[in-house]
Image (cartoon, grey):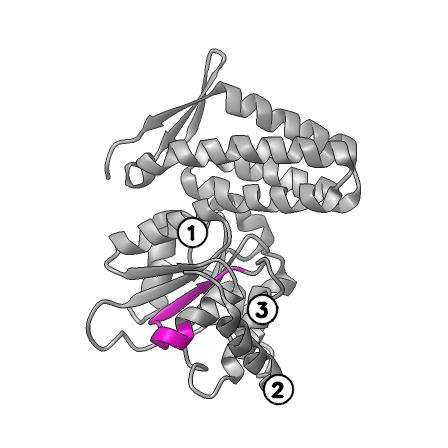
Amino acid sequence: MGTAMAGSEIVVTVDPEIADMVPRFLENRAKDLETLRAAIAAGDRDAVRKTGHTLKGVGGGYGFPAISGMGERIEEAALDGRDADAREAIDDLAEFLVRVRVEVGEAP
Amino acid sequence: MSGGGGEFDYLSQLESLEPPPAPPPPDPKKLESEALIGEKGLERDGFHVVIARRRQQAKSGKAIVLIVEDDEDTSALAARALQNGGYGTVRAKDAAETAAFLKRFGAPALMLLDVNLPNGYNGFDMLRHLRAHPTLSSIPVVMFTASRSREDVVRGLTFGADGYVAKPVTAQALREVVDKVLGG
């Protein structure tokens, strides 16, 4: 399973075992993005941290280590009070969610 | 499962128990040598999955794993992974739902326990109360958390967890951990 760039798309290959769960996973990440934007606009670093922590924990298991990485950046930036870094990671998440395209890998 | 007053009464009984005497702290060097499986991206932290001890295989019937996790996607992924490994699964989102399950059905074969949980009790609190409980103290528990600092891993194992899985983890890796802790 992996991630590859293809033009403006980011192609992520997911495990067939969980492929049917990926659309809901991505819908929930879009909700997380809205939560993050509202929280950062409100200066609610704790909410930013918590959502980043959730992203960190959930991304890789679904085959999206990039989302875990962005979650970790968001969590740590919120912990350190680095709002600009948190915003940048949130913007990266937004771009990722727009560009991502999912393919289902070969069954092992 | 739904919450209710009875479950909170039960929790307050758990709360009134003294925490168990702390076992000797595990040797971090030994823990690192026993780290078995994990996402490569986490390796810099030294821990991804630790199996602290292995239990006897469940005696008969389908082993039930109680997944305590407030994030729906993570919980669903764990349930899928374990069901495909032949386990039955039950899911709870917080301490109250966990207590309701335990009160009604008794001990599962294993608990997969998140650390950051809503509504007052985190996973470490729950683990300490479980280990002090007269009838539930021997439930195998695997911590299942994105909190993966050395401090948190050692804390979980010191409180009596049988294993510690740093999220994110793949379905296959999670199955292997549960198999191993249950003696497979």
Q: Which residue is mark 3?
A: B124
| Residue range highlighted in magenta | B102-114
Under mark 1, the amino acid is Ser
Given the image, on which type of amino acid does mark 2 rest? Glu
Q: Can you name the residue that lies furthest to the top here? A: A7
Relative to B168, B88 lies left or right: left
Q: Residue at x 62, y 63 (%)?
A: B152
Q: Quadrant of the N terminus of chain B?
A: bottom left
Quadrant of the rendered structure where residue B149 is? bottom right
Badge 3, how many Cα within 10 Å: few under 14, some, many 20+? many
* Count of marks overlaid on the render: 3
**Residue sitting at x 58%, y 56%:** B148
Q: Nearer the viewer, residue B108 or B20?
A: B108
What secondary structure is found at the residue carrying circle 3? helix
Mark 1 neighbour class, 10 Å CA radius: few under 14, some 14 to 19, many 20 or more: many
Mark 3 vs mark 2, CA separation in Å: 14 Å
Residue B52: x %, y % from top left: 46, 71
Given the current orientation, which residue lies at the most extreme front position? B5
Quadrant assignment, res B181: bottom left
Upstream in sequence: badge 1 or badge 2: 2
Q: Position of residue B94 (x, y in %)?
A: 52, 61
Q: Residue at x 55, y 52 (%)?
A: B146
The disc placed on residue B75 is: 1
Front position in the image: A6 or B74: B74
The chain letter under disc 1 is B
Alpha-carbon distance for marks 1 and 2? 30 Å
For disc 2, the chain is B
Seen from the viewer's position, the closer of residues B69 and B120 is: B120
Q: Amino acid at mark 3?
A: Phe
Residue B18 is labelled as: 2
